[in-house]
Amino acid sequence: MMITTGGDGDVATRRLFHIVLAVFGLSLLLIPLDPVYSSTVDVGGVGFEARVGFSDRFRPGTWVPVWIHVTNAGIPFDAHIEVITTAGNPYSSRQTRVVYRRPVRLPSGTRKQFTFNIPLTNTAVPIDVRLVELNGNILSNRRISLRESAITSDIVLILDTTGEKWTWLHEVVPTTRSFSPQTRVYVAHARSETDLPTEWVAYESIRTVILTPSFPIASLAPEQITALVDWIKAGGHLLVAGGPGLDLVSVSELADRLPVALSNASRVVTLEEMGYNVPPLPAPTPVLATLARLVRGKVDLAVDDIPLIAHCYVGTGRITYIGFDLGAAPLRTWEAFDYFSRSLVFPPRMVRRSTGSLEQQFLPLVSAQKVPYPRHLWLFIFFFAYGSAIAGSLRLGTKHPAGWLVLTAAIGVGTLFAQAVINTQSKKAMKAYAEVRVSLVDPVSTEASSAVFAGLVDMHGGDWVFSRDGDMHIAPAGQSVYGDPQLLVVEHTDAESRLGPAPPRRQLAVTAQMLEEIPVRVTVTRDWQTITVSLDNQTSWPLHSAFYVDRERWAYLGQAGPGEQTEASFPAYQYMVASDSLSPKWLANSVASIAGRRNPRLDRRQLDGLAHVVHHALTPVGQSLDLPWGSPIIVAMIEKPTQPPLLQDVWATGYHYLVFPAGRD
Amino acid sequence: MRVFFAVLRRELADAVTSPFGQRLTIIHLAVSASAVFLGWPISYTLGRANAAPTLAWWVYAEIVVLSYLALAVPANIFPIEDKIRTGDWIVYGEAPIWAVYLGKTLASLLALAFWLLTVIPIFFTALAISPISIEQLQFLGLFVGLLLTTMVQLGTWIGVTVDSQTFRIVAVDVAFVAIMLGSILLQSLSGSFHIPIYAQPLEVAARIMNITVRDALVGSAAGTLVGLSVPLTTTPAASVSDSVPWGPLIVIYGSLLVFFLALSLLSLRQWRQNSGKEGAYFDPR
C-alpha cells in the first residue's frame, strides 16, 4: 500500500525550527501577564487596624515595629497578614518590593495584636498592611504614609500610663548649653504592655527609654523584658526614673542590672547641689527619695549617702537610675533644669549601634562577591558527546537491534554522569561564603566587639539558605549608596533564613546583627606628636596588610600572625592634610597602593577589594552611623578562615577583611 | 487486538525509527540541550537575586516542542515515507475504530515519552543548577501529561478529518497557536471577572515551579520577598496546589480532551461508513 509520497526533509526540518522560534517569540507576549489578580473584599465582622512605630513616629533607617490589631466577630478563618514595603533608592525606578508575611488563625470573637519588626528606610513610599485570605483575596488593606511618621529627631519612649510625664522634652531649647536652638526631641508614650515590642531591634528608633513608677512593668511578658535588656546591651539607654512607687521586685532580669539595689523604704532628702557642672538650686529643695544601695557603676549624685542618681553600663548600653521624681514642681523652675534633665536623658559617650550602617556601608562588599558556576565548555562537551551517542545509536538501531541497547546505555550513562559529576559540581558552585565583620570598640576599653554577618549560603530547593542563630536578625538592605537594593533574604524559620531567590523571589538584601567577640585588641595612643597603634591578633587567622586609617592619615601596620602583635608609631603631623579635602577615595587608593608595594603577594583583585573596604568604611552615607566619617579604623586582610563556617569545598572569593573601629585611649 | 498492535507498532516506528523520526529525535535533543546550555549561568553575584533560569528554560522548550509534536505526529504532517494515514487503516485495513484510535493515541504518547527519555540527562543537568522539589516535579509531570494527551487528541482529530497535507500543516499550526494564545486570552478575561484561570501552559508551568514567566524568560527582576519579618516564626512554604488552580485547569483541558476524542471517533466512524461506498474515498495527495 503506497499512499504517501515522501516530502523534502530539509524543508520540514527548517520549518520545525521556524515554528519553535516563532513560539518562543510568542511566548514573550506572556510577560505582561505577571500581575496577580487580586481584589479587596469587604468582609463583615473583621476589624483591621495598623500603626507604625512608637506613637506613630520612627527614625528612618532603623527597624520599626508595625502594630496590627485584628478582630473577628464573624466566622472563623485562616489568613495571612502582610506588610509590604519598598526598599531601595527612592529616586530609582528599580525598587524592591518586600512582603513580610505571617499566617494567622482567626476564630470567632478573636481579638489579636501582631507586631512585625521591619527595617524602614524608604519613607517616600507608603507601606501597605493587608489581611489576605489563603486564596489571595485581600480582605482588608491599610495604607500608611511614612512621610509624617518618619522623623530625624531623637525619640524618647516614656513608659507611663498617664501619657503626661517628661513631656517637657518636646519643647525646643533655645538657650541651654550644649544643645543647639534647633534641638528637638520627640516624646512617645507607651501606656500599657501592649505598646512594647517583644524583640530588641524594634527599639532601634528609640534613643532613650524612660521607665516611670506608674508603668506596670511587672505586667510585661518575659520576652518583652528580655527585648528591653537586649536592646540596652546592644547600645540602648534605659533611664529608670525611680522614686516611690517603682516596683521592680518581680522583674529580676531588669532589677539585677540596675546600678543600685532598691529598697521599699523612702525618705525626704534635701537637694542643694546637683553636680559640679550645673548651677546650684536656688533654694534647698526637699524631695521624696527611694532608699537604695550602689551595687555597680557610678553614683552621680548622692545625698546623705543615698544614691539619687547613678549609672552603669550593660553591654554597650547604659542604665541610669534617678531615685526621685525629677519632674516635681520645685525642680521645674530651676534655671538649669532643662539642661540637667537632658544630660540625663542623653548621656555623653554612648555607643550607638545601628543596623542601618551595616546595610549602607558594608553590604556592597558582600553583594559584590561573585561566585562562578562550572564553565560552559564542559557542558558543551557533555551535550555534544551525549547527542552524538544518541544519534549514533539511533542510526545503528535502524540496522541492528543492538542499537537500541546502545541508546538505552547512552541515556543511562548520561544520566549517571549528570547526577554524579554535574550535580556534585553544581552543588559546590551553589555554595558561597559571605563575610562582613564590623567591630565596635567600647569607648572605655580597647577591646573590640563586633557585629557579624558571616556564613555559608547554600541552595536548597531553589532558595539560598543562610544558616543563622535564632537571635540574628536579617533584613533587606535599605538605601544603597549605589542606588539598587542589595542582597537578599527572605524567609526566617527557627534555624535558617532563606535568601532569595525564593517564592515569589527576587532582589533581596541581608544585613545581620549578631554580636560576637573577635579577639583582636587594638590600641591607639597619642603621646604629643606621636601616634602609636598596636594590634594584638588573638584570632587563629593570620592578618595581612593591616592598616590604620582615619580621615586624615593612614599607617601601615604590617602582618600579625595568630597570637602575634604588631605596632606602628608615626608622627601625628606627618600625614596631616586639610581634612576636608582628603576624599575617602583618595585614601582608599593610597591604602591599596601601599599594600601592593609592601606585600607583593597581593593581587589586583585583593587590592581592589581592600580599597573598596576602606572607601566604604570612610564614606559618609547617613546620620545614624556606627562609623561617622573620619572615625579611625583598622582594616586587615585575612586569608580564608580555616575555622567554621568556611569549609574546604567552598568556592569563596579569596579575600576577606576585618574592620575595626579603633578607639583611642 | 492484532490490528491494534499493528497500528501501534507502525505508528511508533514512523514517529521514532523512520529517518524523519530520527531527525525529530535529534532536533528535539538539540533544542533541549540548547535551552539548558543557554540558560546555564556563568556566575552569580551574591548581592543580586539571580535565579538560574536553566530548568525553566528547559521546561519551556520541552512544553513548546512536545506540544507541537503531540499535535503534529498524530496529525500526520511530517513527510514520512510509506505513511499510512489514520483513515487508511479503516478503509484498506478494515481495522476496528477502537484499535486504530487507541493504537494511534498510544503510539503518539509513547513517541513523546521516548523523546522525553532521550533528554533525561539534560533534565538532570538543568535540575542540578536550579533544583525544585519532588512535589513540584510531580505536579509538572501531571500537568504536562494532561496537556500532551489533550494535544494528541486534537492532533488525531486533525489527522482524521483534514485530507490535504498542506491543510493539515496549517490546521496544526493554527491549533497550536490557538492553544497557546487562546489560553492567554482566557486568562486575561478571567481576570476581569476576578476568577483567575491560569491555563496557559507556560504560565501553569511557571506557577508550578514557583517563578514568574517574566523571571523565567528575562531573568530575575526586582520583586517580592516573602515571610521576612517575624524571626523565629515558621512560615509554611506555599503549596504548589495553592498557586495553581487545578480545578479549572482539569475542567478546561479535560473537556478539550473529551471533546476532541469524541470528534475523532465520530470522524473515524464516518470513514468506516464511507469505506462501504464505492469510490467515496479520495486521496488528494
Image: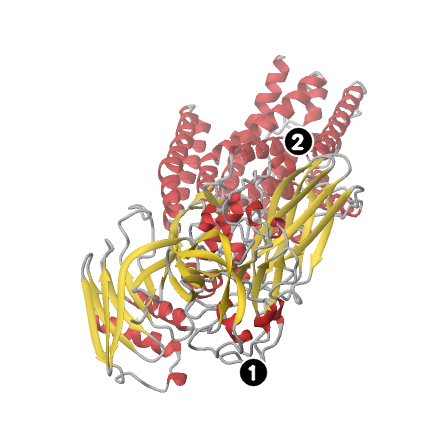
Circle 1 — which element?
A: loop
The disc placed on residue A649 is none
Vertical order, A576 against A62 (above or below)? below
Label 1 with label 2: CB-CB less than 8 Å: no
In the figure, is residue A114 to the left or right of A637?
right
Spatial distance from mark 1 to mark 2, Cα to Cα? Answer: 87 Å
Label 2 resides on the chain identified as B
Q: Quadrant of residue B237?
A: top right
| Amino acid marked by disc 1 | Thr
Residue B115 screen position, x and y as percent: 52, 33
- The secondary element bearing badge 2 is classed as helix
**Is residue A475 at least partly visible in the picture?**
no
Q: Which chain carries label 1?
A: A
**Between B228 and B189, the one nearer to me in the picture:** B228
Q: For the N terminus of chain A, which image quadrant?
A: top right
Tell me the residue that label 2 is attached to. Answer: B152
Image disc number at residue A175: 1
Q: Residues within 10 Å of mark 1 (few under 14, many from 20)?
A: few
- Residue B21 position within the rendered picture, expressed as x and y whole percent measured from the top left: 54, 34
Residue sitting farthest toward the top: B1
Nearer the observer, B38 or A406 = B38
State left or right for residue B282 relative to residue A339: right
Q: For mark 2, does the 10 Å Cα neighbourhood hold few (<14), some (14 to 19), or many (20 or more) residues?
A: many
On the picture, is A426 further left or further right than A166? left
From the image, state whether disc 1 or disc 2 is nearer to you. Answer: 1
Q: For the residue marked with disc 2, what is the amino acid?
A: Val
Name the one closer to the observer, A622 or A188: A188
The quadrant of the picture occupied by the C terminus of chain A is: bottom left
Answer yes or no: is residue B48 visible: yes
Same chain for labels 1 and 2? Say yes or no: no
